[in-house]
Image (spheres, rainbow, N blue to C red):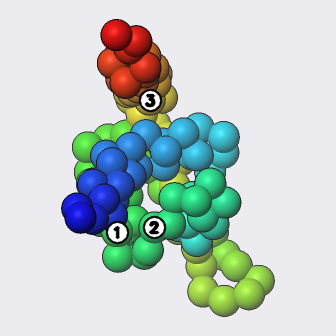
Amino acid sequence: MVNSENTKAQMRKGVLELCILSILSQGDAYPTEIIEKLKETKLVVVEGTLYPLLTRLKNTGLLSYRWEESTSGPPRKYYMLTEIGITYLKELHLSWFELVDAVNKTINKQD
């Protein structure tokens, strides 16, 4: 029997950027908050996956960040969408809904 876990993991990875940008469109967040919000939706992501993605998104101009003092430890790096990131997210949303519609039409096709 074929194990579908690898395919499911690849599918989740493919939408992770969309999910992270969508979370940040709701307000600035630091990585631990992003991970918690993803866990709430059953998209389990570890720091080793999240940090490189946040860095890549920052380096491409989609995100920026600021340091903020914390009462419970070291300063926290809060990420936020840039204007370019907001525009890019709108494009991703459109692409996502088109893809979901196409996939649904394909997998729900009645013969």
Q: Amino acid at mark 3?
A: Leu
- Residue at position x 33%, y 64% from top? 5
In this rendering, position of residue 101 left or right of residue 38: left
- Residue at position x 43%, y 20% from top? 108
95 or 51: nearer the viewer: 95
Q: Amino acid at mark 2?
A: Val
* Residue underneath mark 1: 49
Query: On screen, 86 above or below 101?
Result: below
In this rendering, position of residue 1 left or right of residue 83: left
Quadrant containing the C terminus in the rendered view: top left
Q: Amino acid at mark 1?
A: Thr
Q: Position of residue 23 (x, y in %)?
A: 58, 46
- Residue at position x 67%, y 60% from top? 40
**Residue at the extreme right:** 71
| Mark 3 / mark 1, whichever is N-terminal | 1
**Residue at the extreme bottom:** 73
110 or 24: nearer the viewer: 110
Question: Which element carries disc 1, helix, strand or loop?
Answer: helix
Question: Which element carries disc 3, helix, strand or loop?
Answer: helix
47 or 63: nearer the viewer: 47
- Closer mark to the observer between disc 3 and disc 2: 2
Looking at the rendered structure, the number of numbered marks drawn on it comes to 3
The answer to whether residue 95 of the structure is visible from this angle is no
- Closer mark to the observer between disc 3 and disc 1: 1
* Residue underneath mark 2: 45
Q: Quadrant of residue 105?
A: top left
Q: Position of residue 10 (x, y in %)?
A: 28, 54
* Residue underneath mark 3: 89
- Residue at position x 49%, y 45% from top? 19
